[in-house]
Image (cartoon, rainbow, N blue to C red):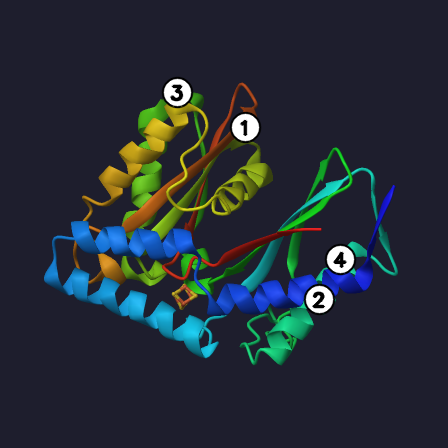
Amino acid sequence: MRVIRYEEIVEKVATMCQEANFELGEDMMNAFHQALKTEKSETGKEIISQLIENAEIAAREYMPMCQDTGTAVFIVEIGQDCHIAGGSLTDAINEGVRKGYQDGYLRSSVVRDPIGRKNTGDNTPAIVHLEFTEGDRLKLKMTAKGGGAENMSGLKMLKPSDGVDGIKAYILDVVRAAGPNACPPLVVGVGIGGNFERCAYLAKKSLFRPVGKRHADPDIASLEIELMEEINKLGIGPQGMGGTTTALDVKIEVEACHIAALPVAVNLNCHANRHKEVVL
Ligand code: SF4
């Protein structure tokens, strides 16, 4: 049994929260530069240039790339031969988020309850999803998920007879309805299958895959490419000002489902597609 100290997790999480907000990943920067070459609208090109400049300033001056510093969402892969000493894993993650957001002067974007709307003041609690794996490693994957894009996401329980055409039509409907409100250019996360709650998780999980990395199954990879082409024909464009870059990528995760069901979830992410990963 391998032992990982509580304090080690706190420190790693605090660093991840700050780095996610200050340093946009190489995958996103590459996608911006690629989009700059392919975008047809002059306004769209100008906006993409500004997004590149914004990300460069944030990284250089250690400032958040957006005023919305997001909800801290974690997918944690915990090996069955790994033991956390000194406290619970969830407490360690929340303490790390508190430290990272407060020390980094990042906006607190979480309210204690959805009706009373009182801010918790430290961006906790984080949303933590656990996946159990073999081995003795602890992998922490974090995203600072923007509220605007999250608000425009959706889930629909399709009928199996709706088929692939129904899936595509629903995804396009969600992106069309989001228009400028999800802060495009987007990364579109899609979950297909599972059940009601699992499907939403799959859509979120898909967003942790680096932009530009296709699904391992060639049929799903083809669907990702086809959907991206269709989404980019919608004309929404960067920041909704028109253009051919509405999405930088489409990610799909699939899982088994009930014979009577075809759940589809679309979790939109904005141009501040911030994700970090560490292995302890
Ligand atoms: S949705 Fe994204 S880009 Fe828009 S305000 Fe929130 S974090 Fe910023």
Q: CA distance from mark 2 to mark 3?
A: 49 Å
Is there any visible trace of residue 66 in the rendered image? Answer: no
Mark 4 lies on a secondary structure that is helix
Residue lying farthest to the front in this orientation: 60
Tag 2: amino acid: Glu
The reply to whether the residue tagged 2 has its Cβ within 8 angstroms of ligand 1 is: no
Observer-side mark, 4 or 2, equals 2
Please name the residue that numbered disc 2 is placed on. 11
Q: CA distance from mark 3 to mark 4?
A: 41 Å
Please name the residue that numbered disc 3 is placed on. 161
**Callouts 2 and 3 close, C-beta under 8 Å:** no
Residue placed at 55% from the left, 25% from the top? 257
Please name the residue that numbered disc 1 is placed on. 255
Q: Quadrant of ligand 1?
A: bottom left
Residue 137, horizontal then vertical, whole percent: 73, 43
Tag 4: amino acid: Thr
**Callouts 4 and 2 close, C-beta under 8 Å:** no
Q: Residues within 10 Å of mark 2 (few under 14, many from 20)?
A: some
Observer-side mark, 1 or 4, equals 4
Mark 2 lies on a secondary structure that is helix
Q: Residues within 10 Å of mark 4 (few under 14, many from 20)?
A: some
Observer-side mark, 2 or 3, equals 2
Relative to 94, 241 lies left or right = left
Observer-side mark, 1 or 3, equals 1
Relative to 93, 186 lies left or right = left
Nearest the viewer among 125 and 45 is: 45
Relative to 86, 70 lies left or right = left
Does label 3 or label 4 sit earlier along the sequence?
4
